[in-house]
Amino acid sequence: MKEMADSLKQNALPGVLSLHAYTPGMPIDELQRRLGIKDVLKLASNENPLGASAKVRAAVAAAAGELNLGLYPDGSGYALKAAIGRYHDIAPEQITLGNGSNDILEFLSRIYAGPGRAVMYSDFAFAVYALATQAQNAEAVVVPSYPANHPTMPYGHDLDAFARVLKTRPDASLVFIANPNNPTGTWNTPQQIERFLDAVPPQVIVALDEAYYDYQDVELRSNARGWLDRYPNLLVCRTFSKIYGLAGLRVGYALSHPTVADLLNRVRQPFNNNTLALIAAEAALADQQHVRVSVDLNARERLRLPPLLAKLGLSHLPSQANFLTIDFGRNAAPIHQGLLERGIIVRPMGSYGLPNFLRVTLGTESENQRFMAALRDVLGA
Ligand SMILES: *Cc1c(COP(=O)(O)O)cnc(C)c1O
């Protein structure tokens, strides 16, 4: 057996062999199966607690009834790209659709990462950057984050350090920045990002991952559209998985220079978005009222919870996203387990090197009340 496993791995690329598969938030079914709990609340994957808007669900239902599912989807994503183009005031030639924005991150690594090339990202950044880098056998240059005791942005991306490290790495081909970052919730100001972009040589591609863009306070939102004209090496990633509530359908997109979009298109599989996903995303983009309602709910809950956590003696990392990463000051695994036993799934942070933290997606007001009650119970407070 051992010998067979060895030969099956013998020709696998070293980067792939060194990978640990991404651990997603536990699915609701799994907790139901494992503990026999019926009423499970999942606050583990930063999904929109309101789900997709009613208009999107109606559009999908109508389409599903009429469509010939035997036909391939529109591989060019013509209608969705046109809608995204209008939304951002950008040409369709500068838009690439992905099967989730995760797809885009992988296209980038396939184009720009490989042996002899360095890919840069922050400590405590989104796990997919490390996976995409390693799978391509490229060198990961992990820039230290701001320290845990930083006065305003503990564990945040230190973009001045990025710029300093970049000067020593002529082999750098790709930089990933998550803003706001997952799993920390921390952010960089538009001024910090712009200062970094000014320092980056033109052949280094900067991927600015804005999965949580809409959740930010208005004054912190980047002007990525304006930057694209000034920085041809910038690529901006957005997703329909978070604020639009379409995580189950897998749609994300990149805005970039047409030359980069052309390269992305070469590595993209021809039909990477399915027909229903294309229809749903277009309907979601058209329903900005649902975005506003979702943003407002999140902003309210993001303000409401911290004082309640403080009453329990708990702090959390600064967040401009739809989750709070809570510091328990000790190994949080037993607390994670206690919450599971009460039917609540949150995200442990041990795999990110933050074993004392749990990341909790902000739910609806009543969901968050249930979470807080369970947390008090677990802590014996
Ligand atoms: C959730 C998330 C994504 C988006 O993932 P999809 O593949 O679009 O579902 C991308 N980047 C970050 C930082 C995220 O947290």
Image (cartoon, rainbow, N blue to C red):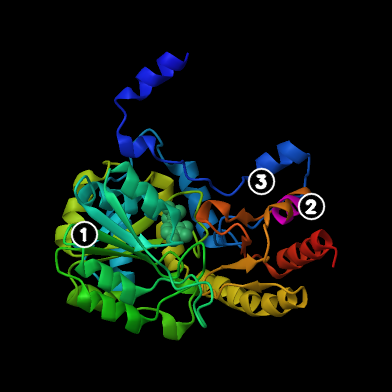
Pointer 2 residue: 342
- Does label 1 or label 2 sit earlier along the sequence? 1
Specify the quadrant of the image occupied by residue 135: top left
Q: Could you tell me residue 93's position as x and y percent?
A: 19, 61
Is residue 337 in the magenta section? yes
Specify the quadrant of the image occupied by residue 227: bottom left
Residue 54, above or below 294: above
Residue ID at (19%, 66%): 233
- Distance from Cα at disc 3 to Cα at disc 2: 13 Å
Q: Could you tell me residue 335's position as x and y percent?
A: 73, 56
Is residue 345 or residue 97 the one in the foreground?
345
Q: Could you tell me residue 183's position as x and y percent?
A: 51, 62
Pointer 1 residue: 172
Residue ID at (30%, 60%): 120
Label 1 secondary element:
strand
Point out the image quarter for the C terminus: bottom right
Is residue 106 or residue 264 the one in the foreground?
106
Q: Where are the magenta residues, as a range?
A: 335-339
Pointer 3 residue: 28
